[in-house]
Amino acid sequence: VTRPGRPGINLEEEPPAVRMNDQLGGILTWKLRGEDALRESGVPYTIIRPCALTEEPGDQALVFEQGDNIRGKVSREDVAQLCIELLEQPQACNLTFEVKEDSNGSLPTDWGNRLAQLK
């Protein structure tokens, strides 16, 4: 959501939503404003920014990153499961991160450890 206004960005290499942000009514700009409003509200939150959503089966390993730089895909099923898992993880409170599939990884067994690596 932060990429459309970044200086030096090569839009040719970006996903369609980034390339077409202006034509789509500034959708990513509005998403970022919503995230900022939530952060400023004082309400506990977890913001998950999935890469391209797919209808593929879940149970894939996941990569978490921050900085709005990753590209990839992730199944809706895995994002839903992630949301459920994070409900019971206090370390997820007040975090914003991106998620995508990791074809070389393994399914997480220690969510707390994975989340502790995020800011």
Image (spheres, grey):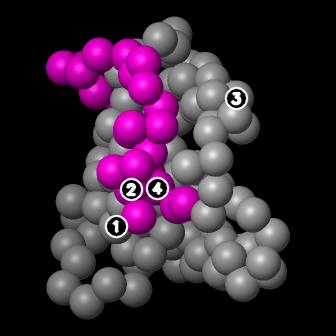
Q: Position of residue 60 (x, y in %)?
A: 40, 16
How crowded pointer 2 is (Cα within 10 Å; few <14, some 14-19, many 20+) is rated as: some
Q: Is residue 51 left or right of residue 95?
A: left
Q: Is residue 115 visible?
A: yes
User: Closer to the observer: label 3 or label 1?
Assistant: 3
- Residue 38 part of the magenta-drawn span: no
Could you tell me which secondary element the residue under label 4 belongs to? strand
User: Between 20 and 76, which is closer to the camera in this rendering?
Assistant: 76
How far is disc 2 from disc 3 in space, using C-alphas? 18 Å
Q: Is residue 84 above or below residue 4?
A: above
Q: Which residue is mark 2?
A: 118
Q: Residue placed at 44% from the left, 75% from the top? A: 2
Which residue is tagged 3?
Answer: 84
**Which residue bears the numbered disc 4?**
97
* First-in-chain label (2 vs 1): 1
Q: CA distance from mark 2 to mark 1?
A: 11 Å
Q: Residue at x 71, y 60 (%)?
A: 45
Query: Is residue 76 visible to us here?
Result: no
Residue at x-position 58% and y-position 49%: 92
The kind of residue tagged 1 is Gly
How packed mark 1 is, by other alpha carbons closer than 10 Å (few <14, some 14-19, many 20 or more), is few
Q: How many residues crowd mark 4 within 10 Å: few (<14), some (14–19), many (20+)?
A: some
Q: Circles 4 and 2: CB distance less than 8 Å?
A: yes
Amino acid at pointer 4 = Phe
Q: From the top left corner, tell me how far across and down residue 44 is, in percent.
A: 75, 63
Amino acid at dot 2:
Leu
Q: CA distance from mark 3 to mark 1?
A: 23 Å
